[in-house]
Image (cartoon, grey):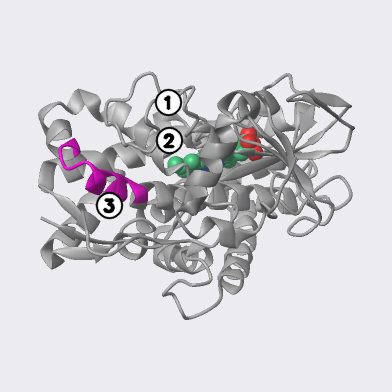
Amino acid sequence: MTVIAEAALDLGDPQLYSSEERFALWREHSAADSLVWSGPGSSPRGFWSVFSHEACRKVLSPTAPFTSEYGMMIGFDAEQPDNSGGKMLVVTDGEHHTYLRQMVAPFLSKAMATTLGEFIEEEVRASVDQALAAGSADVALRIGPSLPAAVVCEVLGVPAEDRERLVELTNHAFGGNDSAFDKMTPSEAHSEILMYFYELVSRRRRSPGDDLVSTMLADGRLGPRDVLVNCNNVLIGGNETTRHAITGAFHALSTVPEALPRLREDPSLLGKAVEEVVRWTSPAMHVLRVATEDVELNGRMLPKGTPVVAWLPAANHDERVFSDPRAFQVDRSPNRHLGFGNGPHHCLGAALARAELAAVLRVLAERVKEISLAAPPKWMRSNLTQGYVGLQVDLH
Ligand code: HEM
């Protein structure tokens, strides 16, 4: 049965997601297949929300009359559009989206993941060994962030001599406001990164290489600003989510002590375990779309221009699709999670994210006997990213 309701709470309020009470909220709404209206607040004109696996899939499906071009997160809508719409991959639709996707895809592909395999494995070994030597670590600060930042630098063709600076800036930019990185605010760090990309674009115009920036420039159809916003898309896409999936892998493994021995004894479980980490952690918390025509959703007609939010962790905890959804099941199968989204904007970096997570699980299974939480996780205050400000673990 679908429940259509006015939210008692503004579902865009980031405070709602900084405690584990959010799981009960999502469970209730996905079980009822709710369609919920949040009035003006976190978003100037308000928005509708869907939660069930089926409703989220429907809104994101390739044939659904919805667009991302006004923006894909709470705060944007037809009257307050994202100014990167129609230029940046994730907020572009139609032919130009296909064109951008085809150009960027080879740099984030399975083949690229294979090429970077050894690099990824070495990075993981170094950070796990460091944590093992210390016996404990704050994974959210010390392990989760570094690998995704390093991989994005590789993909974007950041020269080796600039990498350390870029990884450090990325840590500042995505560490969240309450993070322990105190040299600058996240938005100052993000601006510095954009300035750096601006320089990198100029450098690649003078002396092109075989990297993503040079490829985007060589085509001639994209101006420097288009290249810049798409570098930013890869930067955000590659960092903001993956760091929390990696951190969450440690958290998930701490809840099921037999998971690591099972992975050690049967490495063929690795692929399933990676999918389960993505489902269980669901770092991309919501995606927003705007109706391109009047559309019926969960029994209600919504007029053209209506913003609708799909809550992906709620869909990934839908009991109709996932048995005992809060449990981390290392061999869960089938696992039709929506952690990477669905439809035309399905995560382009999924192969890289999977390779990073597989390396983390493999190295942990090889080297670590047991992971235990030294303190309860500290959650980010965000409506966009489900992630950790702190995850203190002991490694044995
Ligand atoms: C798109 C999740 C890792 C690059 C998306 C979307 C989701 C998502 C849900 C769809 C957004 C929408 O429908 O509006 C995740 C998760 C990750 C991850 C959970 C890690 C566990 C990565 C990585 C990269 C990346 C490692 C690149 C290095 C992108 C790009 C898009 C995208 C470029 C836009 C695709 C398009 O619009 O066609 N991601 N992502 N992501 N992601 Fe990821």
From the viewer's perspective, is the residue at label 2 or at label 3 nearer? 2
The magenta region covers 248-259
> Could you tell me which residue is drawn at 53 percent across and 66 percent down?
173
Q: Amino acid at mark 2?
A: Arg
The reply to whether the C-beta atoms of the residues labelled 2 and 3 are less than 8 Å apart is no
Residue 59 visible in the shown view: yes
> Could you tell me which residue is drawn at 51 percent across and 50 percent down?
22
Residue 209 visible in the shown view: no
* Residue named by callout 3: 123
In the displayed structure image, the side of residue 177 where residue 352 appears, left or right: left
Q: For numbered disc 2, what is the local secondary structure? A: helix
In the displayed structure image, the side of residue 165 where residue 93 appears, left or right: right
Task: Find residue 295 and report its horizontal and vertical position in percent.
Answer: 83, 25
Local packing at callout 3 (Cα closer than 10 Å; few below 14, some 14-19, many 20+) is: some
Task: Find residue 121 and report its horizontal and vertical position in percent.
Answer: 25, 44
* Residue named by callout 2: 279
Give how far apart the Cα atoms at labels 3 and 1 are. Answer: 33 Å
Q: First in sequence: mark 3 or mark 1?
A: 3
* Residue named by callout 1: 322
Give how far apart the Cα atoms at labels 2 and 3 are. Answer: 24 Å
The reply to whether the C-beta atoms of the residues labelled 2 and 1 are less than 8 Å apart is yes
In the displayed structure image, the side of residue 160 where residue 119 appears, left or right: left
Q: First in sequence: mark 2 or mark 3?
A: 3
